Image (cartoon, grey):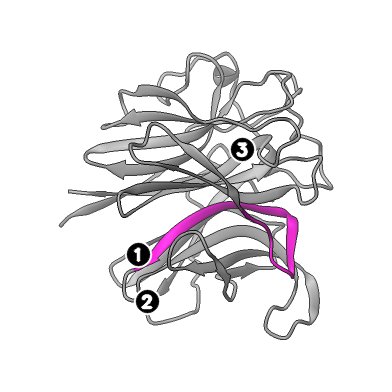
Amino acid sequence: MNFQIVCLSFCFALFYNCSKDSGAAIENPDAATNAPACQTIAESANQYTTFYKPTNGWVGDPMPFYENGKFHIFYLYDARNTLPTFHPWYKVMTADFATFTENSEMIPTGNATDQDGALGTGSVFKWNGTYYAFYTGHNGILDPKEKIMLATSTDLKSWTKNPSFQLQASWGYDRNEFRDPIIIEDKSNGTFKMLIATRSEVDLVSNANVPWRAVIAQYSSTNLIDWTLEKPFYEDTSTFITECPDIFTMGQYQYLIYSNIDDRMVHYKYRSLTSNVWITPENSKLDGIAFYAGRTVLRWS
């Protein structure tokens, strides 16, 4: 079979999961439409000619899923209104990235006091005929602010939240910076891995305190419901957090893509399938600062 990797990011506004607690309060949903964001003048005026944009609102953090010749692109719908709840998951479909079919809201937000008063980035995975949407439940008035939550579907259209599933940061990880889950399958042993963007101040091998660093946490499961903490998948002392991690394998190499919250760019690293050492290319950036929260999608033909 032939396959193609597509890396995409449709919209470049600032969202709550692109902020630091110590930085500007850009997670405020009451912010005006013309609040500072990574936009050109043409984008601010809604003058889109290439990228998809809904009739009302904006697109954030695309989460693509490919099946049967169609790209199902879930995204955070940014209404920029004054509601205390924000960023429900919407979906758009395309076969060629030139024409799009809107599918409207897929997963709604919870109430203002719920863990998922705001929805954050996640991913969709299919197993045994069921689609699993793991997403970030974010609420700035709660402690922890962020947990990983779950909704399921049998048709990629109607989604049912699983209120009993709430995965929060394990000991040693930052309970308020715990988001952007993505699932990868290890077919060699029938297990699944969940990678999560977070931070840690503990060496999880020696349990010694260390300076805060960005970590891509790793959990394992055999049923997508019960998850066990494993050793970190990736650690980075050079940035606050590595958001929206993504993984794919091509040939004899595994590739890691993530968004660096400090320089506002998408970076990549790679390693041999027989090595645990990540290689950083001389130019590790995939684009400029207008390209953020990029994710890849695998298309088979």
Q: Which residue is mark 2?
A: 273
Quadrant of image for the N terminus: bottom left
Q: Residue 184 in magenta?
A: yes
Q: Quadrant of residue 71?
A: top left
Q: Position of residue 191 (x, y in %)?
A: 40, 70
Cβ–Cβ under 8 Å for marks 2 and 1: yes
| Rendered residue at 39%/24% (across/down) | 103
Q: Which residue is mark 3?
A: 119
Highlighted magenta segment, given as a residue range: 166-186
109 displayed left or right of 82:
left
Q: Position of residue 8 (x, y in %)?
A: 42, 41
Q: Residue 283 in magenta?
A: no
Q: Secondary structure at mark 1?
A: strand
Q: Secondary structure at mark 2?
A: loop
Q: Secondary structure at mark 3?
A: strand
Q: Quadrant of residue 292?
A: top right
Q: Which residue is mark 1?
A: 249
| Rendered residue at 31%/75% (across/down) | 188
Q: How many marks?
A: 3
**Among numbered discs 1 and 3, the one appearing first in the sequence:** 3
Q: 157 and 277: which one is in front?
A: 157
Q: 217 and 293: which one is in front?
A: 217
Mark 3 is on which residue type? Answer: Leu
173 displayed left or right of 6:
right
Q: Is residue 270 visible?
A: yes
Q: Residues within 10 Å of mark 3 (few under 14, many from 20)?
A: many
Distance of mark 3 from mark 2, alpha carbons? 34 Å
